[in-house]
Amino acid sequence: MIRKLLLASVATATIAGSAIAADLPSRKAPPPAFIPPPVLTWQGFYVGANGGAFWNNSRNITTVGTDFGVPLAGAAPFSAAAAIAATNNFGNNGNNNRVGFLGGVQWGYNWQWNQIVLGTESDFQGTFDSCRNNGNNGAFFGGFGNNNNGCIQTSVGLAPIDATGLNMLGVQAVERRMDYFGTSRVRAGFLVTPTLLLYGTGGVAYGHIRTTSVISTAVAGVPAGAVIPGVSVFDDRRLKAGWTAGGGLEWMFLPNWSVKAEALYYDLGRTTFTQNFTQLLPPLGIALSSTGTRTIFNNTGVIARAGLNYHFSWGAPAPVVARY
């Protein structure tokens, strides 16, 4: 009898303990908070770096000589021949390939409406020229001389001095470089996929153009010192502005990170300068010829470059957070 009472008591205690345990709060860990994935958006501010190459496709450099005339009797044929020998149109044979390298930074802001992305972008690049030029002369007796002198183009002209049996020799060397380059443009693009942007772009461009020209004329075939050659040196550095247009592709390979490739055509206008010089007869320094020249070339070219951008996504729409 006592044994049955003990067993009944144990069973009652067990049932009561289970019931009490069921009423206690659960100690199970809560589910992890849901963190939404980053919103893929093109909208917002971005900065980046770029590098590439540029080609100066304005190969033609034209110089026109003018005979200022001299009062010295019998010198008229010399002065006229000097103007002809100084007249050159070189670089127009298409073989002078000017290629340079550039690298710099860009920054901008995008606005996105579904598949349409509009924005503004500015950039600044330092440049390094690497040129291979073959000079060509369009003067009196045709082309003379080819060269491989970096960014220096050289032309040689030869003109007969009437019936004297002598010739006038004209030589001009022109060096032109672009030290740095920048643009400020608008961009209009279409998202082919959510991560691939196809865009066109255009705006203003500027570049620091450096120009040096050395030109001279001399009577060929006369003893050294019989005639003092006429020489003029022009040296100019200035900032020139123009326009640019082009297009490219940009791929957002990670949230906030994208790479791009683009090509731009640029036109920084025309460079025009004049030079004057006189040949002299020693020892009195009487003018044998007096010549003025006007040189013209265009500052146009093509840029091809690649870049890496980081997008801050400032102003982008906030992500939708699930609620429970």
Image (cartoon, rainbow, N blue to C red):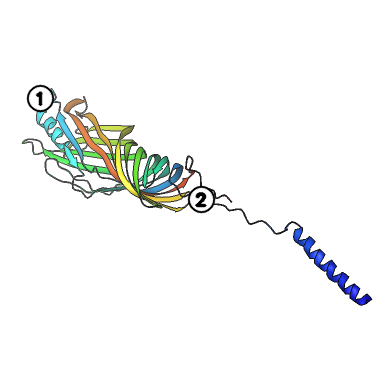
Say what amino acid the circle numbered 2 marks: Pro
Number of on-image labels: 2
Instruction: For residue 304, say whether it is visible.
Output: no
Looking at the image, residue 260 sits to the left or right of residue 256; the answer is left
Q: Which residue is mark 2?
A: 38
Residue 169: image location, x then y, percent: 17, 39
Q: Secondary structure at mark 2?
A: loop
Instruction: For residue 90, say whether it is visible.
Output: yes
Q: Is residue 25 above or below residue 66?
A: below
Q: Which residue is mark 1?
A: 73
Residue 140: image location, x then y, percent: 11, 40
Residue at (42, 40) in percent of width and height: 109
Q: CA distance from mark 1 to mark 2?
A: 88 Å
Q: Secondary structure at mark 1?
A: loop
Q: Residue furthest top?
A: 71
> Front-most of 169 and 150?
150
Residue 221's disc is none
Looking at the image, residue 321 sits to the left or right of residue 113; the answer is right
Residue at (47, 45) in percent of width and height: 311
Say what amino acid the circle numbered 1 marks: Ala
Looking at the image, residue 18 sits to the left or right of residue 121; the answer is right
Residue at (70, 59) in percent of width and height: 28
Q: Earlier in the sequence, mark 1 or mark 2?
A: 2
Residue at (26, 34) in percent of width and height: 271
Q: Residues within 10 Å of mark 2 (few under 14, many from 20)?
A: few
Q: Residues within 10 Å of mark 1 (few under 14, many from 20)?
A: few
The N terminus lies in quadrant: bottom right
Looking at the image, residue 198 sits to the left or right of residue 270; the answer is right
Q: Toward which corner of the image does residue 3 lie, by quadrant?
A: bottom right
